[in-house]
Image (cartoon, rainbow, N blue to C red):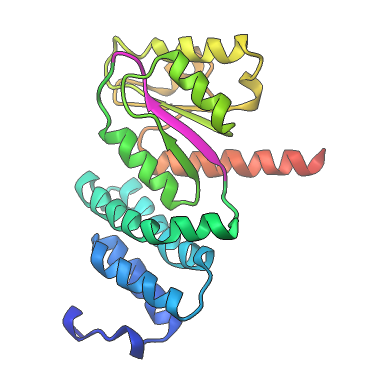
Amino acid sequence: MTEDEINLQEMSDDEIYELMKEDLYDGYAEEIEEEVNEMLARGHEPYAILTNGLVAGMDIVGIDFRDGILFVPEVLMAAKAMKAGMGILRPLLAETGAPKIGTMVVGTVKGDIHDIGKNLTSMMMEGAGFEVIDLGINNSVENFMAAIEKHKPEILGMSALLTTTMPYMRVVIEALKTAGIRQDIIVMVGGAPLNEAFAEEIEADAYCRDAAVAVETAKRFMKIRRAQQKAL
């Protein structure tokens, strides 16, 4: 069956969710919007559509990106398709108070204007069910601290692509310590010149080599945190 012959009205719910995953993988934004609207018209909850369609699809994209089957251009296309679906679902999710995995503030550090990796991470994190506050590029410690104060995130993500801007991550972490909130926030860092040794040196919680690893790492940390909160 060609794309032109697909009639959503004739498909079962499960078939549409499978089609959503395929279309997300292929980066078909318009088709994703049509499928999201069809499922809403059938009475499906926004959170169910997010989970069974968009998040499930981005999980597959993340695995294939991690394994070298997909590359950045394809993942960006998939992420844009996911954002098209999220554009419809986000206001509805806000109305229904749908659960989210966690909240993340993310930004490129001061002096650095590179953002492709950060943008990809933001989109994939959102696709995984996180609320993401993306501060953009060239962020001072004051920018990060103000966003943390306002949004109370569980996770702070910092990106740098220049060896000259990498040390600024330590400045932000020291500010978290001074404010007495370092233990409350999971700090994840990434960028081409970084490595695990550098992350340990600046006392970050994790180094993430790419967006797929960032999503996996964030999910793991949130699972640990939830377990700790239940134990209290």
In the current view of this chain or complex, which residue is farthest to the bottom? 10
Q: Which residue: 58% across, 57% down?
A: 98
Q: Is residue 32 above or below residue 155?
A: below
For residue 133, side relative to residue 112 (left or right): right
Q: Which residue: 61% across, 12% down?
A: 177
In the current view of this chain or complex, which residue is farthest to the right? 232
**Splitting the image into 4 quarters, where does residue 213 fall?**
top left
Quick one: quadrant of the C terminus? Answer: top right
Tally the marks: 0
For residue 79, side relative to residue 149 (left or right): left
Residue 225, percent from left and from top: 67, 38
**Splitting the image into 4 quarters, where does residue 122 fall?**
top left
Q: Is residue 189 above or below residue 2?
A: above
Q: Is residue 173 above or below residue 136?
A: above
Specify the principal SS of the magenta part: strand
Magenta span has 24? no
Quick one: quadrant of the N terminus? Answer: bottom left
59 or 156: nearer the eye?
156
148 or 158: nearer the eye?
148
96 or 164: nearer the eye?
96
142 or 184: nearer the eye?
142
Residue 38, percent from left and from top: 38, 77
Q: Magenta stretch: give its range.
A: 102-111
**Splitting the image into 4 quarters, where does residue 26 fall?**
bottom left
Q: Which residue: 42% across, 32% down?
A: 208
Q: Is residue 91 above or below residue 162?
A: below
Residue 227, percent from left and from top: 72, 43
Q: Which residue: 49% across, 51% down?
A: 129
Residue 110, percent from left and from top: 34, 15
